[in-house]
Image: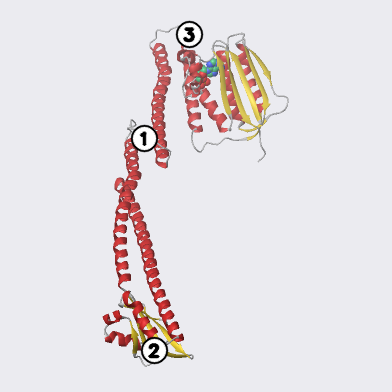
Amino acid sequence: MKIRKINSISVKLGTLLFAIFFILIISIESILYLFFVNFYTQDTIDELTQRSYAFAEVLSNHYDETLLNHAGLIESTSSKMILVVDNTGEIIASSDNIARLSSDYLDEVINHGYAGHGPIIASDWKNEDFFVAQSFIERDNQAVGKVLMFSPTDPVRQAATFLQKTFTVIGFITLIISALLIYVTSNKVVQPLLKIISVTKLLSEGNYKWKLQTKGSDEIAILSHSINQMSDDIQNYQQQRTQFFVDISHELRTPLTYFKGYVEVLLDGTVTSEEDKKKYLTLLNTQSGQLQRLVQDLFDLSNMEHEGFTLHQTHTSIETVMVNALDFMGPSIEQKGIQVNVQLSRTPLYVSGDEYRLQQVIINLLENAKKYTPASGEINISTYQKDSNCIIEIANPGPGIPEKDLLRIWERLYRVDKSRARKTGGSGLGLTICKKIIELHDGKITVKSEEGIGTTFQIMLPFYVEK
Ligand code: ADP
């Protein structure tokens, strides 16, 4: 259905171009034709008028027999004819070739507009056989006769027919060539479009192995490139989605397996001592806490990825955010024997931020720092100003993150050391949420890490601007 629609575009385009060519060619040829024919006719008429005027002038000055005979002789060898008549219309001299004209025709010409003064009596080359020019012979300011000159219209008619035939042939050939060119060109445009349609159709059916050619830099190549890009994006998205479902099922299955195991042990009566029962119940409590955290993080993330999600941004002090997060995390970090060095900016730093969400980011980073810092290690925290941004840095010693994983730690559920991370209770969604929150604040979060030495997270947030 759609393919036919595109074909009809090529037909429409071709017809339009052809019509434009057709009108253009016909117009140019008509203009040329009229120009040549008018030029030729005018040239003949001018010459005829001049000659009849010249004879009439000579005869006006020297009116005698010899001159009259001479006048007749002059034109007898050319295709033109001359006729000299007196006031009464009597022929007093003529060239020999005048005998070709019938007496009726001559009568009509001689008497036509005798009283008139126009030099051209006949100029219609299509319907008359001769152009006729007249000039009066005058003596003492009185017309005593006139000189009539004839020139056949045949050559003009022949030239006009020749031009018509030539222009028809040229026009025809030009139109055939332009039709062919239009066909080839519109095909060149439409063929890639048809290819694009078939590939996008395959894409919509989930077949991603076809790629469009992207040679050149025209609009078709750009469109093809965008479609290839879109195909890759969809493919990636689908792979990520499948991976996410695999990961999330795994995440849920592990604690649920523990759950089932502990509950079965408690139910089947093998555990009798209160101490052991307490141990299993504590394990159950830890696992359900982790599960709860995972579900909460998933809920948070899906909320944030939702189009309509908005932050509650106010004039937020970075110092307040840091102090609150440290109050919350500080005791548990110190309990692990880790020292926390804090160096907050002396100048107060303000951002347009959601205080609760920013605290959530810092707590998350502190939790990670605590997890990976060995006992008796030191976590260094600092805030400072750089250009028109607030910078927050949290650095901790520890195993570090291998370079190959540095880009991937922001992905959902990605963990460097899966078994270890799960044991330490992380959901694998922490950094994804942190990145999302910082980006919603128009900020940036980056990481630097060296294996076996430590890791530093840096957050950059734009200063608060009064709106
Ligand atoms: P988790 O809940 O597993 O901590 P995160 O998204 O917070 O998930 O972190 C992703 C992974 O990044 C972690 O599993 C860990 O491998 C690595 N990571 C995060 N922070 C640190 C850190 N401070 N030191 C070393 N590795 C870290």
Q: Which of marks 1 and 2 is nearer the N terminus?
A: 2
Label 1 to label 3: alpha-carbon separation? 72 Å
| Residue designated by label 1 | 213
- For image coordinates 59% across by 8% down, the residue present is 375
- Where is residue 139 drawn, in percent x and y? 46, 90
Indicate the quadrant where residue 340 lies: top right
SS under mark 2: loop
- Where is residue 243 drawn, in percent x and y? 40, 24
| Residue designated by label 3 | 274
Q: Which of marks 2 and 3 is nearer the N terminus?
A: 2
Residue 2's tag is: none
Scheme of image coloration: secondary structure
Can you tell which of label 1 and label 3 is closer to the viewer?
1
Q: Residue furthest bottom?
A: 88
Q: In this view, does 16 lie to the left or right of 276?
A: left
Label 1 to label 2: alpha-carbon separation? 83 Å
- Where is residue 287 drawn, in percent x and y? 47, 17
Residue 114's tag is: 2
Kind of residue at disc 1 = Gln
- For image coordinates 66% across by 21% down, the residue present is 382
SS under mark 3: helix
Q: Determine whether 92 is above or below 167 in the image.
A: below
Indicate the quadrant where residue 40 lies: bottom left
